Amino acid sequence: MSRRLLQLLPFLALAALVLATRPGQGATPGIPAVQAAQAIPSTDQPVVSSQGTGKVTAPPDLLTLVIGVETRAASSEAALRDNANRANGLIDTLKRHGIAAKDLTTSQLSISPTYDSNGQRITGYQVSNLVTAKDHDLPGAGALIDAAAGAAGDAVRIQQIAFSIDDDSALLAQARADAVRQAHDQADQMAKAAGVKLGKVRSISEGSSVSPRYNYGGLPAPGAAASAPTPILPGTQDLTVTVTAVYDVEQ
């Protein structure tokens, strides 16, 4: 061995020691690389994932009605003036039948020209004014619609009605609890079938949905207010909560 190589041996040994104990290179500072790898415990943990669904059915207690008036005239000014008179009469009628001011919202106001059959010459103007009304008195909803139609006449337009549950928090809580219990029972069954024991819950995530009822309508039948009220059938609402749960598995 040459004298030059003998002089370099201490430096080569020191470099090898530094590389073996260098942080961030798969080793713990001050511990050789092989020993550091053995000191890191395994984080692999078997789990079981399950899903549960809770469903509650209840009758709605709120009707959301989109109603308004549509008028036409030779000039935009005349069409707007006629529309304003009819719309104010409609709104006053809704208020007299128990709709609170806070439950009335203008949802659309538009002015547009009308054209001849060729679509080239303007023949007049059309004004549409729609309001959204929230009615908490479902048994009286038919009479409300009839009165509104009587106030607006042939200009009345009913764009949409929708039924909902005003406060569904308690019903969703019930559906959520049912979903969690179902997910736990399902996970426990799978664990037993696999010959292992179900451990602690690791995570639970939720998704919920409500099936609203919509109706899109036209005018109530002429003379409906003078005879039987317009029939309104709210039906029922389905509130569904789905949860996905992940549990540890004990061997």
Image (cartoon, rainbow, N blue to C red):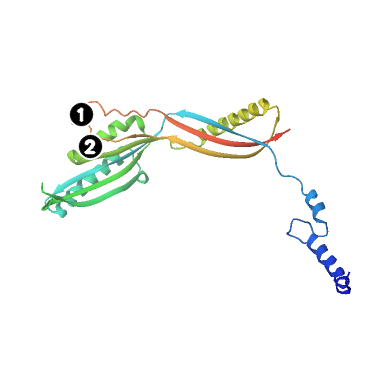
Toward the viewer: 56 or 62? 56
Q: Residues within 10 Å of mark 1 (few under 14, many from 20)?
A: few
Identify the residue at horizontal 26%, vertical 40% (top origin): 93
Residue at which label 1 appears = 226
- Which mark is in front, 1 or 2? 2
Q: Secondary structure at mark 1?
A: helix
**Residue 197 sits in which quadrant?**
top right
Q: Position of residue 251 (x, y in %)?
A: 73, 32
Q: What is the CA distance from the residue labelled 1 to the residue labelled 2?
A: 12 Å
Q: Position of residue 186 (x, y in %)?
A: 61, 28
Task: Tell me the kind of residue under disc 1.
Answer: Ala
Residue at which label 2 appears = 149
Looking at the image, tell me whether mark 1 or mark 2 is earlier in sequence order: 2
Q: Secondary structure at mark 2?
A: helix
Picture disc at residue 91:
none
Residue 21 visible in image? no
Identify the residue at horizontal 15%, vertical 47% (top origin): 72
Residue 73 visible in image? yes
Q: Residues within 10 Å of mark 2 (few under 14, many from 20)?
A: many
Q: Is residue 239 above or below residue 12?
A: above
Task: Tell me the kind of residue under disc 2.
Answer: Ala
Identify the residue at horizontal 70%, vertical 42% (top origin): 44
Q: Is residue 119 left or right of residue 166?
A: left
Identify the residue at horizontal 84%, vertical 70% (top origin): 11
Toward the viewer: 83 or 89? 83
Q: Position of residue 194 (x, y in %)?
A: 67, 27
Q: Position of residue 162 (x, y in %)?
A: 35, 36
